[in-house]
Image: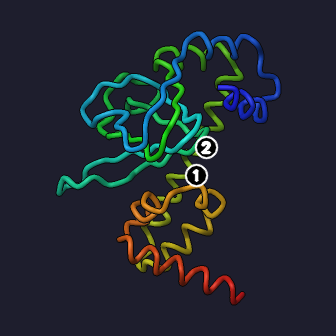
């Protein structure tokens, strides 16, 4: 949890003891093993979840019933088991730990209360939400690219600093390409970059 407070202080230097103790008193830290399901698609999971370490992914099913990666959360990213942090309505997505993962679980009602009562908590949510918006903008940009190579280049342009932290499988899932295509595009990209 100390990693969260370090990150939080970086974005909100005036982090008070009241915000800190609120999080300590009202949250739970939970460990998930690699490939362990965090939340099933139809399961009620009324928590605001912050990834303290590891990697988590959110999947939704397409019209064929195939799970499609729609969210990827690295340390200091968040997800909710509800449609968004301000509703108790179920979010129809499955979340899984891609590697050994530690989550901070804050009940949704407590997170809403903290946002109203503590400006530092509201600021943390704002910073994390912007990271999520940036990720969704990446997904939109990837969806506009028709060729696999253009998609890979867009991905590296926008997400290149974070990509090395990720295992390959969620990357090829995110890029909507098969394993062998992913490795071909990655090799081509590295070759092209070494020439420049």
Distance from Cα at disc 1 to Cα at disc 2: 6 Å
Residue, far bottom: 195
The structure residue drawn at horizontal position 62% and vertical position 69%, both measured from the top left corner, is 157
Q: Which residue is more in the foreground, 40 or 32?
A: 32
Q: Residue 134 carries which label?
A: 1
State the image coordinates of residue 72 (x, y, percent, origin top left). 48, 49
Q: Residue 43 carries which label?
A: none
Q: Which residue is more in the foreground, 187 or 85?
A: 187
Identify residue for label 2: 130
Whether residues under marks 1 and 2 lie with C-beta atoms below 8 angstroms apart, the answer is: yes
State the image coordinates of residue 165 (x, y, percent, origin top left). 60, 55
Within 10 angstroms of label 1, few (less than 14), some, or many (20 or more) residues? some
Q: Quadrant of residue 54?
A: top right
The structure residue drawn at horizontal position 62% and vertical position 86%, both measured from the top left corner, is 192
* Residue 151 to residue 54: above or below: below
Within 10 angstroms of label 2, few (less than 14), some, or many (20 or more) residues? few
Local SS, label 1: helix
Residue, far right: 13
Q: In which quarter of the image is residue 118?
A: top right
Quadrant placement of the C terminus: bottom right
State the image coordinates of residue 114 (x, y, percent, origin top left). 59, 16
Does 61 sit left or right of 159 as displayed? left
Does 115 sit left or right of 70 as displayed? right
Local SS, label 2: helix
Does 55 sit left or right of 165 as displayed? left
The structure residue drawn at horizontal position 39% and vertical position 51%, both measured from the top left corner, is 70
Colouring chosen for the image of the structure: rainbow
* Residue 192 to residue 51: above or below: below
State the image coordinates of residue 149 (x, y, percent, origin top left). 48, 80
The structure residue drawn at horizontal position 55% and vertical position 36%, both measured from the top left corner, is 51
Quadrant placement of the N terminus: top right
């Amino acid at each position: 949890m100390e990693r969260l407070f370090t990150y939080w202080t970086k974005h909100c230097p005036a982090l008070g003891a009241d915000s800190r103790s609120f999080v300590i008193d009202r949250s739970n830290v939970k460990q998930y093993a690699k490939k362990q399901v965090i939340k099933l698609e139809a399961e009620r999971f009324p928590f605001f979840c912050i990834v303290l370490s590891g990697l988590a992914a959110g999947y939704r099913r397409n019209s064929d019933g195939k799970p499609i990666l729609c969210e990827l959360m690295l340390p200091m990213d968040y997800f909710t088991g509800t449609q968004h942090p301000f509703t108790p309505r179920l979010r129809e997505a499955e979340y899984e730990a891609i590697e050994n993962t530690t989550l901070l679980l804050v009940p949704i009602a407590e997170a809403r209360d903290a946002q109203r009562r503590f400006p530092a908590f509201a600021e943390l949510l704002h910073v994390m939400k912007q990271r999520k918006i940036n990720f969704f903008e990446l997904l939109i940009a990837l969806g506009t690219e028709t060729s696999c190579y253009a998609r890979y280049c867009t991905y590296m342009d926008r997400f290149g600093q974070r990509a090395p932290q990720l295992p390959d499988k969620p990357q090829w899932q995110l890029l909507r390409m098969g394993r062998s295509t992913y490795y071909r595009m990655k090799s081509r990209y590295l070759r092209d970059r070494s020439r420049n």
